Structures are given as structure tokens and as C-alpha cells.
């Protein structure tokens, strides 16, 4: 069956209404603050993980004004464990710019939204279409998969020119202009839902797909071959040594990580590139108190961190390292900490 643009958009809209996701906490609203927050949190993060973070975040910062007025430490503390912390830093900067440059109201046009920190083309389009009905295409990873399979787009998306061409294809599938304002929110959500729940990377459920009969990849029986991307980022690894200095009352010595770098902007145990460098940072009389902890691995997107922790009980808080500070036991849990550091400290807390 030949692809009809009108038929395609209509099928997506009807399917979303009947079978799509309609009960997520950031849905059933046209509040751009909540839609924006959910879109940023959902980047490279599963819905099941985002649910709890979203609820805690909007309870603490219910609107863009409260988020803009918060300290970055408070924002990072609430984000801690969600990963990809540049998202949280950009979130904070974006809220401040919305207040300073746009009077506290999110711009209604995707082209203007895209000028704000942390908002790329697809995220801007999602906000504009879901909240304001703008007729503009989104193209996140899930939607790229849907579009390339439906039209049989087999050009290599490792090349920027081919990505630009795919944007044009996605725009050509949008609902007709005369009814777009009403249809766009559900169409956009439908494309997201198809990619997230039906048009899966390895095991697409073609039988449940509302556009199977017009899908080139389904007809050819090769949906897993789309999208085509030949260039992949190589994984790397890095070994780090961490000094876990702690007093008897639970205060921990923490540094604030520089930007850019690993865990930029977060509070962290002092990091060293070698065991020798860590030992040399400890005054000689205290070195006998160093206690090696089991080494472990922490996996980032494109890097494996091999972490070696040395614990050091400390009696005198006059001792310190670099530009860090002692943080009381009731304070450090509220700070933005890398996930493995938080887990390490929490597990060591007395029951």
C-alpha cells in the first residue's frame, strides 16, 4: 500500500488516543515547564526511572520561577543519581534565561526555544507542538527509528547531510496544516509512543503497529536494519583513585569537581590518577590508617571508570585537601553527588 501522508498522520493520532501512553505524570497538560522538564529528564533515561525524579523535582520546584531562584547545588542535589549532569546544569541556566529574557514565560515557537541552554531542535519541537500546537517535527532517537523504517530511509545517519534530509522527511509526514494545531499534540506524542513501545530496536511489534501496511521496512521484513549509522563512538576506560576521608561523627571531605571533566560541578571525594598520588596527598603519620576498599567499575555512556577507594578515618577536621571542605553527615546527602559516591557513602552509614 502506498504511503499517504494524510492517512499516516491520522493513523498515528487515532492509535495514540486508543493505545498510546496517556497516564504519565507529565502528560495531559500544556504546561511548557512540565513538558520541558520531562523532555530533558527523558533524554537517554528510561521512563520508569524518570517518574520518581520528576515527582520529586516538581514538588521542590513547581515552576520555572522557583527553579531559576534555586542554587545550582540544590538542583544538582535533587538530580543526583539521574546521570548526565550537564542536563541539570543546562536546566538551571535555561530557567534563569526564561526569567531574564522571556519574562518567565516559555517562548511558543520552536525556533526561539532552541536558543535556550540545553534545548536542541527535537526538544524545542516537542515543547512547541505538545504545548502550543506548532506544526513542527520531532526527531529523537525513537522517532528516527520510526521514520526511517516507514519510508525505507537507508542513508547513513553518521553524515550530517543525511540527518538534514531525514528532518525534511519527518516534516513531510506531519498532519495537514489546516488541522495541525489540534492534531499536533497527539501526533507528536504518538510518534514518541510508537518508537518507545512498538517500533523497538531489536524486536519491533509490527503486528501492533498502526502504520505497518504503509511501512517499507515491514514489507521487506528487515526493520532491524534501520536506521543506518556506520560510525560508532569507541568506548574508553579510566582508572581513578578516591580518598574517602571521614570523621567519627560522619563528616566527609568533599571537593567540587571542575568543569569540564568527569562529574563536572558535582561534589566528590578527592580524585587522583594513581595510588601513589593519593598516598602522597596524605600526611605521612596518617598513611598507616589508609584502608583499601574493594575496587569496582562504574559505567558511563562511552567510558568505563575503574574506581579504587582508600578510606581514611580522621580525628582532626583541621586536616584537608585542596579546595574542598568537611561536609557534615546531615548535609552531604542533600548535595549533588555522583551516583557511585552516594552509594558508597550511604552503604557505609550505620543502620
Image (cartoon, rainbow, N blue to C red):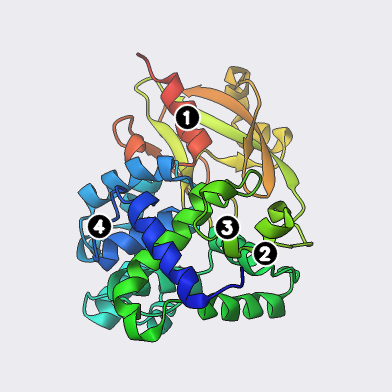
**Residue located beneath label 4 in the image:** 28
* Residue at x 39% of width, y 52% of height: 20
* Residue at x 61% of width, y 47% of height: 204
Quadrant location of the C terminus in the rendered image: top left
Q: Earlier in the sequence, mark 3 or mark 4?
A: 4
Is residue 233 placed above or below 115 in the rendered structure?
above
Which structural element holds mark 4?
Answer: loop
**Residue located beneath label 1 in the image:** 343
Q: Earlier in the sequence, mark 1 or mark 3?
A: 3
Which structural element holds mark 1?
Answer: helix
* Residue at x 52% of width, y 53% of height: 209
Q: Earlier in the sequence, mark 1 or mark 4?
A: 4
Q: Earlier in the sequence, mark 4 or mark 2?
A: 4
**Residue located beneath label 2 in the image:** 216
- Residue 110 left/right relative to 95: right
* Residue 2 drawn at (x, y percent): 61, 72
The extreme front residue here reads 1
Q: Nearer the viewer, mark 1 or mark 2?
A: 2
Marks 1/2: CA–CA distance: 47 Å
- Toward the viewer: 232 or 154? 154
Quadrant location of the N terminus in the rendered image: bottom right
What mark, if any, has residue 233 been given in the picture? none
* Mark 4 Cα shell of 10 Å, populated few (<14), some (14-19), many (≥20): few
Tell me if label 1 and label 3 are in contact, CB under 8 Å: no
Residue 89 seen in the figure:
no
**Residue located beneath label 3 in the image:** 212
Tell me if label 3 and label 2 are in contact, CB under 8 Å: no
Marks 3/4: CA–CA distance: 27 Å
- Toward the viewer: 318 or 55? 55
* Residue 223 drawn at (x, y percent): 69, 55
* Residue 340 drawn at (x, y percent): 52, 34
Amino acid at each position: 500500500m502506498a504511503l499517504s501522508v494524510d492517512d499516516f498522520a491520522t493513523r498515528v493520532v487515532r492509535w495514540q488516543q486508543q493505545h498510546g501512553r496517556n497516564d504519565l505524570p507529565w502528560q495531559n497538560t500544556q504546561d511548557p515547564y512540565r513538558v520541558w522538564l520531562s523532555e530533558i529528564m527523558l533524554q537517554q533515561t528510561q521512563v520508569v526511572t524518570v517518574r520518581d525524579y520528576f515527582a520529586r523535582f516538581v514538588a521542590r520546584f513547581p515552576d520555572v520561577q522557583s527553579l531559576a531562584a534555586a542554587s545550582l547545588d540544590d538542583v544538582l542535589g535533587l538530580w543526583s543519581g539521574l546521570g548526565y549532569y550537564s542536563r541539570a546544569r543546562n536546566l538551571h541556566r535555561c530557567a534563569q534565561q526564561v526569567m531574564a529574557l522571556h519574562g518567565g514565560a516559555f517562548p511558543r515557537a520552536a525556533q526561539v526555544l532552541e536558543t535556550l541552554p540545553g534545548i536542541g531542535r527535537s526538544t524545542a519541537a516537542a515543547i512547541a507542538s505538545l504545548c502550543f500546537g506548532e506544526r513542527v517535527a520531532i526527531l529523537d532517537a525513537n522517532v528516527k527509528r520510526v521514520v526511517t523504517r516507514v519510508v525505507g530511509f537507508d542513508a547513513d545517519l553518521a553524515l550530517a547531510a543525511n540527518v538534514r534530509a531525514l528532518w525534511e522527511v519527518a516534516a513531510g509526514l506531519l498532519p495537514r496544516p489546516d488541522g495541525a494545531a489540534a492534531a499536533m499534540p497527539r501526533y507528536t506524542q504518538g510518534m514518541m509512543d510508537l518508537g518507545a513501545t512498538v517500533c523497538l530496536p531489536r524486536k519491533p511489534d509490527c503486528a501492533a503497529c498502526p502504520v505497518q501496511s504503509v511501512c517499507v521496512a515491514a514489507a521487506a521484513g528487515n526493520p532491524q536494519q534501520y536506521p543506518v549509522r556506520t560510525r560508532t563512538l569507541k568506548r574508553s576506560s579510566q582508572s581513578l583513585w578516591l580518598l574517602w576521608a571521614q570523621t567519627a561523627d560522619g563528616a566527609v571531605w568533599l571537593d567540587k569537581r571542575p568543569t569540564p571533566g568527569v562529574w563536572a560541578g558535582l561534589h566528590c571525594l578527592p580524585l587522583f590518577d594513581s595510588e601513589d598520588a593519593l598516598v602522597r596527598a596524605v600526611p605521612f603519620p596518617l598513611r598507616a590508617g589508609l584502608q583499601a576498599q574493594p575496587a569496582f567499575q562504574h559505567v558511563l555512556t562511552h567510558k568505563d571508570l575503574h574506581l579504587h577507594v582508600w578510606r581514611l578515618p580522621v580525628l582532626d577536621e583541621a586536616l584537608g585537601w585542596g579546595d574542598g571542605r568537611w561536609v557534615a553527615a546531615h548535609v552531604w546527602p542533600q548535595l549533588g553527588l555522583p551516583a557511585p559516591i552516594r552509594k558508597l557513602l550511604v552503604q557505609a552509614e550505620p543502620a
